[in-house]
Image (tube, rainbow, N blue to C red):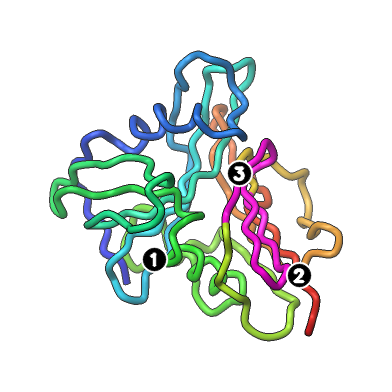
Amino acid sequence: MAVIHHTTLTPSKVELLASWLPSRPWYRAGPAEPELVKAGGFRLDDPQGEVGIEFLVVTDTSGNRPTGYLVPLTYRGAPLDGVESALVGTMEHGVLGKRWAYDGCHDPVMVGQLAALIEGRVQAQDQNISDVPDREVTTSYTGAGPLPTDFTAGDDHDGTLLTTPQGTTLHLHRVLQPAPDGPLTPARGATGHVTGCWQLPDGTRARGVLAVLHAGPRT
């Protein structure tokens, strides 16, 4: 179980993302600096207790209309070899010291735990309170057998696509779209998905799909 420390972060996560988001191909606002507020999210536990895993939702109000972004982050006590391009930045944690923050889609620990979440083997945890499940995060999985975890991540205008050599794909919706009222229906042909909630600028709660899984062909 991850222990959440209520302490200082310098720079803050929102400040760190303000300089990183505009470099992403899925960022939708213009050249002005993002105006970000934290809007929600959840955490996953690292079984080894070494890596912090957070799915952070931020809302940017700098564009013509507010836009919510899903940003999975991992926090490490030392640099992660081989994924230097996925480094979002470093922060000074009031308890843990220097922390390296990575785009979690390129961190094998996060990818493995996200697969476990979709399969139903682990449960999403509250973003701000230790050892409290987040009941607003729901998953489905209709595939057969365990998911592969040898994903490679790539960004485009539509979000982040993780793929395996076997053809399994996991699409993370970086730009969040609130779903209409009523039950969420999975994407056509999907074998799994993750849904979650976040807060809109007017204070209401939105719900939408965060990630969609399509299994590769059986061999």
Above/below status of 52 relative to 20: below
Report the amino acid beneath label 1. Val
- Which residue does the image show at 39% across and 57% down from the upper left? 82
Q: Position of residue 185 (x, y in %)?
A: 80, 58
Q: Quadrant of the N terminus?
A: bottom left
Q: Which residue is at the front of the view, 189 or 137?
A: 189
Q: Residues within 10 Å of mark 1 (few under 14, many from 20)?
A: few
> Residue under circle 1?
132
**The image quarter in which residue 67 lies:** top right
Q: Residues within 10 Å of mark 3 (few under 14, many from 20)?
A: some
Q: Residue furthest right?
A: 188
Q: Earlier in the sequence, mark 2 or mark 3?
A: 3
- Which residue does the image show at 67% across and 36% down from the upper left? 157
Magenta residues span: 153-172
What is the secondary structure assignment of the residue under circle 1? loop
Q: Residue furthest front?
A: 82
Residue 191, numbered label: 2
In magenta segment, residue 199: no
Q: How many marks?
A: 3
Q: Earlier in the sequence, mark 3 or mark 1?
A: 1
Cα–Cα gap, marks 2 and 1: 28 Å
Q: Position of residue 208 (x, y in %)?
A: 67, 48
> Along the horizontal axis of the image, is 99 left or right of 153?
left
Q: Nearer the viewer, mark 2 or mark 1?
A: 2
